[in-house]
Image (cartoon, rainbow, N blue to C red):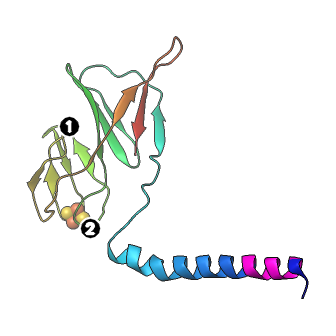
Amino acid sequence: MTEERRIFLRNGWDWIRLAATAALCYPLFRFVKFKVPKKPRLVKVEKLMKVGDVYLDQEFFLFHDESATWAVSRICTHLGCRLNFSEKEHLLICPCHQSMFTTKGVMVAGPAKRNLPLFPVEKMSGENAKGYIVSL
Ligand code: FES
């Protein structure tokens, strides 16, 4: 056997050992719930909001008042139905089982047991930038 062939085979075995170690460690990482953090998805809302405005997206509500702009999930924490905004009651209401949440995502009435997640909102900057960027 030539020296080059021997080196090639040794390197090949190193790669196979590395792959086998990774394959064996994968269930261990899953067991301890190791997750690679996923990148946030950025959604542009190209609209300047006035105080009291509400913007509806498929996945979130965007609210704006005198002090802040915030985004709250539109997906119910009970079984995942899409929430509606009731202007009269100023609440987010689930059409499936009537869970209710405040506009800040706090659960008011069940059967949902968890609050709605809030998403970070940034105001677009620049001369021609009008609107907000929501990180989902
Ligand atoms: S899915 Fe919303 S209350 Fe059940």
Magenta: predominant secondary structure element?
A: helix
Of residues 7 and 98, the one drawn nearer to the viewer in this rendering:
7
Q: What's the residue type where badge 2 is placed?
A: Leu
User: Is label 2's Cβ within 8 Å of ligand 1?
Assistant: yes
- As displayed, is residue 125 above or below residue 94? above
Q: Earlier in the sequence, mark 1 or mark 2?
A: 2
Is residue 7 located in the magenta-colored stretch of the structure? yes
Name the residue beneath numbered marker 1: 87
The magenta stretch spans which residues? 4-11
Asked where in the image residue 110 lies, by quadrant, the reply is: bottom left
Residue type pointed to by label 1: Glu
- For image coordinates 24% across by 44% down, the residue present is 85
Give the residue at x 66% y 77%: 14
Q: Is residue 22 above or below residue 107?
A: below
SS label for mark 1: loop
State ligand 1's quadrant: bottom left
Quadrant housing residue 20 = bottom right
- Neighbour tally class for label 1: few under 14, some 14-19, many 20 plus, Cα within 10 Å: few
Graded by Cα atoms within 10 Å as few (under 14), some (14 to 19) or many (20 or more), the crowding at tag 2 reads few
- Residue 130 is situated, as x and y percent measured from the top left of the image, at 46, 19
132 over 7 or under it: above or below:
above
Q: Residue at x 23, y 60 (%)?
A: 77
Mark identifier at residue 79: 2
Give the number of callouts: 2
